[in-house]
Amino acid sequence: MSPTTQFQPTCHVCGRGVLDRVKVYRLSGCAVVVGYVILIPTVIGMAAGGFVFIGSFLPVEPAVAGSEGLPQEVALAAGGAGLMLFFASLVGGLLGWLLVMKKWVLRCTSCRATIAAN
Ligand SMILES: [Zn+2]
């Protein structure tokens, strides 16, 4: 008996290997690639949208002394656009995240047979 504390059942397919707990992608490689393609711009979109939204609340210094700052309507519109970009990116990001989600499986070290694990 090995003094390991990890539970490693023997493979029932080949009877030789042991089942290792590994994390694999839930979907096929193609869907995972699509997921990352969606995920990368949405992360940037969320950051940009949040930045514009927060920035619209900050007082804008007049570029030229004596001139007016950013009109309130423009700041409000920019804030709204920023918020919309943020939420659109959030929804897209969730979709991308669903595609790249991983799951735990038990995989045989000998024959590579996989069994679903919780
Ligand atoms: Zn096996």
Image (cartoon, helix red, strand yellow):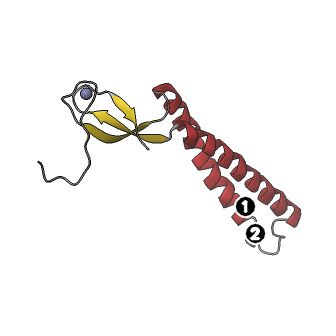
Q: Is residue 111 left or right of residue 83?
A: left
For disc 1, the marked residue is: 53
For label 1, the SS is: helix
Ligand number 1: quarter of image: top left
Give 105 or 74, whichever is nearer the viewer. 105
Q: Amino acid at mark 1?
A: Phe
Residue 58 figure quarter: bottom right
Left or right of 40 on screen, residue 54? right
Residue 95 sits above or below residue 85 on the image: above
On the image, numbered disc 2 is attached to which residue? 57
Q: Residue placed at 45% from the left, 41% from the top?
A: 103
CB under 8 Å between discs 2 and 1? yes
Q: Is residue 101 left or right of residue 23?
A: right
Q: Residue 66 at what x, y percent from top left?
A: 82, 75
Give the total of numbered labels: 2
Viewer-nearest residue: 13 or 114: 13
**Looking at the picture, how far across and down is residue 46, in whole percent?**
64, 52
Residue for point 62% across, 45% down? 94
Q: Residue 99's x, y, as percent?
A: 55, 36
Quadrant location of the C terminus in the rendered image = top left
Mark 1 vs ligand 1: CB under 8 Å? Answer: no
The residue positioned 77% from the left and 70% from the top of the image is 62
- Residue type at mark 2 is Phe
Q: CA distance from mark 2 to mark 1?
A: 7 Å
Instruction: Name the residue: 75% across, 73% down.
Output: 59
For the residue pair 82 and 92, the one nearer the viewer reads as 92
- How packed is label 1: few (under 14 Cα within 10 Å), some, or many (20 or more)? many
Q: Which residue is most to the right? A: 73
